[in-house]
Image (spheres, helix red, strand yellow):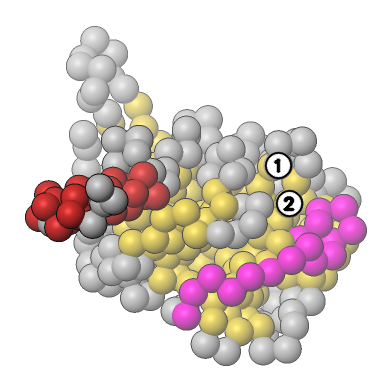
Amino acid sequence: VFRLGTEEQVPYRMAVHPRGDGLLCAFPNGCRLVRWESPEGEDSHSLVLRSDQEALVKLKDVGLQLAVSFSGEGSILATGGEDGHLRVFKWPGMETIIEDPDAKTSVKDLSFSSDEKFLVVNRSSGPSRVWDLKSSEAVANLPREQGEIFGFCRFSTKSDNSQILFVTAMQGDYGKIISWNTTSWTRIGSKKVTRDAISAFSVSPDGTLLAIGTIEGSISVLGSRDMRVVVTVKKAHLGIVTTLAFSQDSRALLSTSFDSTARVTSTESPKSDGISLWSMVLAIILAILVYYYMQHKEDLLAMLPQ
C-alpha cells in the first residue's frame, strides 16, 4: 500500500495504537511514531505514511527499547529498555506516569490489564513486578521458583470478566506457562508445555486459547483453562518464531519467523469433515472385518451348526 524508508536503521519492536493513532517503532537509538492518512478523493485502499518527529520527543535518544505497548484503550504507552529503564506515559500528552530505571537488568516484556489498572513487567532477572497505574506504585512482586527464568507476560479476561495473568518461564530444559490470580497475586498453577525455549507467546481475544512459538520453529495452541494442547505444528517455520497473533474470532493464528515467512494456522481441533478420529478407526475396523468375511465366507458357513 505504501512504503516508508528508515534508511539504515531497522525497527526492532513495533506497537500499533488500538484506535489508529499511529505506529510506534523502536530503533536502536530510540523510538519514532509513524502516522497514516488516506488521501481524499483517491482509492480507499491508498495510504500515506509520515513520520511524526514531535510526538515522541521523550523517547528520541533513549536507546533500544525491547518492549513497547499501548494499553487496550490506547490512553497509556509503556516502553522497557535494554538498559533496564521502564517508562510509562499518558497518551497522547506524554505526561510521565511511571519511571523506573534499573541498570542491573533489561526489560523483557510488559502487559497491560484490559481495565488499564495494572501493568506487569518482566525483566531479565528477578521477579515479575506489578504496577498500579493509578497510584504509580508497585503493588506486587511475583516470585520465581528455583531455576525459573521468566519470559513473556499477558493478561487475559475469563468468561466471568475476571482477569488472569499468564507468564512463560524456562526451568531447566522445559518451557512452562504459569497462571496468577490478579487479586491476591498468587500462583494458580503451572504446566510444562515444551522442551524448547519459548520465543513467542499470545493469548486469544476471547481468553480461551494460549499460543507459544519456539526457537526450533514449532507452534502450539493450548486451552487456557487446562493448558492441554489443541493444535501443534512441528517445524512450522525453519527459523525462530518471532511473533504470534490470534484473529479476532480466535479461530486462526498468525505466526512469523526469522526465516522471513508468515503462516496462518487453524486453531480448531483437527477433524475430517466433522467425523471424529474414533469414528474413522471404527470404520476401518469394520472394513477389515467385511474383507475377512468375504475372503473366508465358505469356511465360516461350514463352521455353522447344521
Up/down of 236 relative to 112, above or below: below
**In the rendering, at what x and y percent does residue 139 appear?**
87, 61
Mark 2 residue type: Ile
Q: Nearer the viewer, residue 170 or 115?
A: 170
Asked which secondary structure carries label 1, the reply is loop
What residue occupies the far front of the structure in this picture? 306
Q: Is residue 177 above or below residue 182?
A: below
Task: Of the two numbered discs 2 and 1 on the same chain, state the one appearing first in sequence.
Answer: 1
Residue at the location (74% across, 79% down)? 144
Q: Is residue 170 visible?
A: yes
- The answer to whether residue 272 is magenta is no
Image point 14% across, 51% down: which residue? 297
Q: Which residue is pictured at 69% across the width and 42% down the height?
A: 157
Q: Residue at x 59, y 44 (%)?
A: 208
Image mark count: 2
- Of 128 and 194, nearer the camera is 194
Judge from the rendering whether residue 1 lies leftward or rightward of residue 217; answer left or right.
left
Label 2: which secondary element: strand
Magenta stretch: dominant secondary structure: strand
Q: Which mark is residue 134?
A: none
Q: Which residue is under mark 1?
A: 158
Q: Are marks 2 and 1 in contact (CB under 8 Å)?
A: yes
Residue bearing the label numbered 2: 164
Viewed as shown, does residue 237 lie left or right of 129?
left
Crowding at mark 2 (Cα within 10 Å: few <14, some 14-19, many 20+) = many
Magenta span covers which residues?
Answer: 180-195
Q: Is residue 288 above or below residue 247?
A: below
Mark 2 and mark 1: span between their CA atoms?
Answer: 7 Å
On the question of residue 58 being in view, the answer is no
- How many neighbours does mark 1 have within 10 angstroms: few (below 14), some (14-19), or many (20 or more)? some
